[in-house]
Image: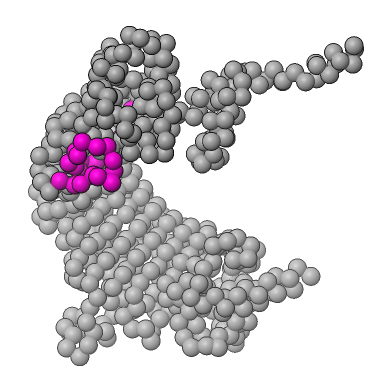
Amino acid sequence: MAHTLVSLHQSRPHPALHQQDILEHVFDTLETRAKGLDRQTLAGCTVVCKSWSDPASRVLWRILDSFHPLWALLAGRSFPPSAKRMSEFWKIVEPDIFVKEICSKEPEWWKHFLYRASHVREVGTASVRESELVLIQSVVKHNGGLTFLPTLRRLGWRNGVASDTTLHLIASPSLRDLELDFTAFRQLNVWNQDDLILSGDVADIRPEDLLSGLSTSAPFLRHLAITGRRITTAAVVPHLLGFQHLRCLSLFKEVPLTPEVMQSVLTNLPSLSMLNARIHGFSDPQCKGVSTSMRMLRLHGHSQDFVGLFSSFLDVPHLDILELNLADESYTPSLPHALSALSRTSFTTSLRHLSLSALTRPLDFGPDADADVDPSRPSVLSTTVIAPLSAFRSLEVAELHLLDLPARISDADMRALARAWPRLRRLVLAYSPMDPQHLPSLASLRHFAAHCPELRYMSVSKLRLETMSRDADGEETAADEEKTVGGHPLERLDLRMTLVGRGPFDTQGIARFIDGLFPNLILDGEAKGSNGFAPFVHTWDDIERDIRALRVARAL
C-alpha cells in the first residue's frame, strides 16, 4: 500500500507545469525557436490538459497569416486547406445575419471568439474583398463598435476596394506596424485567389479616404510602409503628418518626394528616424530639410537629384546609415558631383554604414567612344568614389556596388580604401572592370590586414592572381604581416568572382599568403557558405587543403 502511494506521488506533475506564466514562456520559446514552423506541435499542446490549453492557445493565436483562422473559429468548424481562399460556406451566408445569430443564440461561443481574437498580435496579409469587409464590419458592429483585435500590433492590409475605410474599425492604439498596399482588384462573386483579376482601371482607388483620420485610430503607429499602383504623393503624404510617434516610413516609387514634400515630412514627424523613399526634382531645391532624429536614409533617384539633396537641402547631423540607389540610364558627370557633395554634408563624422549602388547602362569603349569616357583616363573609382568618401572616417560598413561603371581599380586604390576607413567591419566591393587587364592583385588584400584591424567580412568581385611566392610579396608585405601578429579577426572572405587569370594557380603560395594575413578565416569545410569560390570550386578546394595543412603544421 505504501509502495502504491509513493508511486502515485512520484507520478504527479511538477507544480511548475500548472503555472500559467511559466507555461506561456515555454510555449513562446517553442514558437520562437521554430520560427512558426512547428505550429502543429503547438496546436497539439492545447489539447494535452486544461492547464496547458489556455497558455498554448494564447501563443498559437498570437501570429496569423490572414484573418481566415478567425473566421473558421467564428463559424465553429475546421476549414480544409482551401480555406485560405475562403470556402463555399461564405458564398451562401449573409455576414451580418450570421454574426447576429451567433451573438444571440450562441453567446458563449461569441465570447470565446472575442477572447481568442484578443490574443492576436500580428496578421501577415489581410487582402480583404467586399464580402469579407462586410463580415469585419458586422463583427465590429455586434462588438459594440469596438475592434475585435484590441492588442493587434502588426498588420499587412491590401486596400483593393475604392473608398473603403474598414481598416479604421480594426486599428487601435496598440497598432505599431502597418503595411498598406493600394492596388485595386475586381471582385468576381467567388472568393478564390485564382479568380482574382487586376482591374484595368485602378484610378478609382482613393488612398486619402483610408489615410484620412488613420492617425487618430492608430495614434502610436511607429512603422508605416505604403505601396500601390497609380497613387500620388499629394493623395498620400499630407495624411501622414499626424503620426507624431512615427519612427520608420517607407514610401515606394509611386510616391516620390520633392524638396517641399520632404521638408514637410521631416518637420512634421519629429520622431522619424528612418525614411525610405524616391526623390525627384532636387536639381535646385529652394528649401532645406532638417532632422535631428533621423538615423537611417534609404534613398532612390538620379545623380543630379542627389547633387541638390546633399549640396544645399539635407541637414541630418546624427545620420548613422545611408543607402543610396542611383538609377541613371548611363554614366553622367553628376555622379562624381553627387559624391563630392555627399562628402561635405553634416553627417560625415556620424555615418557608420554606407551602401552605394550605381546601376547604369554599359558604356562603349570601342574606337568611336566619346573622349570623355576614354579608357586611358584616371581610374573612376579613385577619382569619383575613394577621394570624396574618404571623408567618412567612422565608417564600419561600406558596400559599393558599382555595376557597369567605367571602373579601373589598382592596388593603390585598394590601399586608399583601407587607409580611408580604419574602423571597417564589413566591406563589399562589386564592380565591372573597365580594363580586365588591369586589376588589383590578390596581394592588395594586405592593406586591409594592415589598416582595418576590426574587419570581419570582405567581398571583392575582381582580383588578379599572380605567383604568391615570398620573394614576390616584397618587403611591404612582410612589414604588413608584422602588424597582424596575433591574428587578424577576419572570418569571412567572399571571392566568388575574383579568380581572374589562367591556371594553373600557385595554390600553395595563395594559401600561405591568405593564411598569413587572416589566420582566423572560417573555411567552407568548417561553416557552410562562409567562403564562396563556387565558379572555381576545385581551385579553392586545393587552397583550403593547403591552408589546413599550414594550420596543422603551426599547431605542432
Determine if the magenta segment contains residue 308. no
Q: Residue at (35%, 31%) from the top-left corner?
A: 67
Q: How is the image coloured?
A: one colour
Q: Nearer the viewer, residue 199 or 203?
A: 199
Identify the magenta region.
175-199
Q: Quadrant of the N terminus?
A: top right
- Exactly how many numbered labels are in the figure? 0
Question: Residue 263: x percent and y percent?
Answer: 17, 42
The residue at the far right in this view is 2
Q: Which residue is located at x 43 percent, y 32 percent?
A: 63
Q: Nearer the viewer, residue 553 or 11?
A: 11
Say if residue 155 shows up in the picture. no
Q: Nearer the viewer, residue 315 or 535?
A: 535
Q: Residue furthest bottom?
A: 367
Q: Where is 301 relative to 1, above or below? A: below
Q: Residue at x 90, y 16 (%)?
A: 3
Q: Position of residue 363 (x, y in %)?
A: 22, 78
| Residue 18 visible somewhere in the drawing | yes
Quarter of the image for the C terminus: give it.
Answer: bottom right
Horizontal side of 355 relative to 166 (left or right) equals right
Q: Position of residue 73 (x, y in %)?
A: 41, 24
Whether residue 191 appears in magenta in the rendering, the answer is yes
Q: Residue at left 19%, top 60%?
A: 302
The quadrant holding residue 407 is bottom left
Q: Position of residue 479 (x, y in %)?
A: 58, 75
Q: Image check: 326 left or right of 280?
A: right
Instruction: Classify 392 as above or below 94.
Output: below
Determine whether, in the image, residue 477 is placed left or right of residue 68: right
187 and 520: which is toward the camera:
187
For residue 72, which quarter of the picture?
A: top left
